[in-house]
Image: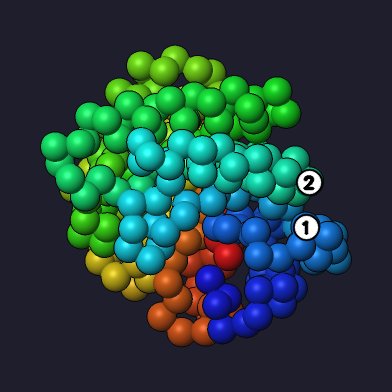
Amino acid sequence: MYTELPFLQRFAAAHHDGFGAVEIQFPYDTPIEQIQQALAENNLRCVLINVPAGDLMEGGEGLAAVPGKTAEYAAAMVECLYYARALKVSCVNVLPGRCNDENKRVFYLDTFKKNLLKTAESLAPFGITTTFEAINTRDMPGFLISSGQQMLDIIAELNHPAIKAQFDIYHMALMGHNVCDFINLHAAKIGHIQFADIPKRGEPGSGTLDFPAIFRCIETSGYKGWVGAEYKPTRATSMTMQWKRDLAVNVALCS
């Protein structure tokens, strides 16, 4: 969001539009001090960042689940911990990545779970929750985790109090989930929520989801975390805020 602006100018725009917090997908190309200054000048919190994901956004398999990239992932975690502590984030998200060979899926899942547990053990002493997310297989074919049940199974298996699901309403709705049912049933296992409308990932009201009902569900579910706007604006970002004026929710901006 606010991609029509240079990165460091997006903080002022978010503040102007009434956001109290932001999340940053990958902050690592910008010096920490510059981000800290932008946050302070605009009275914003940074609530979440992702662990570096290697070549994932360019169509590759990423880092977190690839058996041959454990050293690379460990180095990424060191960099992430440095940023996470300095920015005082609440959550760090781990992107599972892709598995392009179905015959190797079991090995990728095993590697991912080991890396996820190591990440949680590194971050928990600093009060940071480790999340991971399921992504729809239309946008990312071969993505390792693509359903809410898969997330629940991993959380149950690892049984670590600081590991929770990042529940992305857009991805899960595209995969056929009833998002309100999932949130109501599993709010305690969710560490962060993100949203966009379906089918084109635009702002609420640009597609078919009933966001008034979804936000009411979140508010009554017992969920304690932030809700992150992670949509692709159909116009300049500031012109897509009608949903925010209509719905009073605890929202962070995804930049």
Front-lying residue, 130 or 236: 130
- Residue drawn where x is 53% and y is 71% of the image: 1
**Residue farthest to the left?**
103
Q: Secondary structure at mark 1?
A: helix
Judge whether 202 appears above or below 172 on screen: below
Instruction: Inspect the image, locate mark 1, and give the three-letter code of the amino acid beneath it.
Output: Ile
Question: Percent position (x, y) of residue 104?
Answer: 20, 36
Quadrant placement of the C terminus: bottom right
Whole-number angstrom distance, CA of label 1 to CA of label 2:
7 Å
Colour logic:
rainbow
Is residue 18 in view?
Answer: no
Where is residue 5, by image quadrant?
bottom right
Residue at image location 47% in from the left, 52% down from the top: 53
The image position of residue 79, as x and y in percent, is: 66, 46
In the rendered view, tell whether residue 43 sits above or below residue 192.
below
Residue 84, by quadrant, is top right
On residue 86, which mark appears? 2
- Which residue matches tag 1? 32
Q: Are marks 1 and 2 in contact (CB under 8 Å)?
A: yes
Few, some or many residues within 10 Å of mark 1 (<14, 14–19, 20+): some
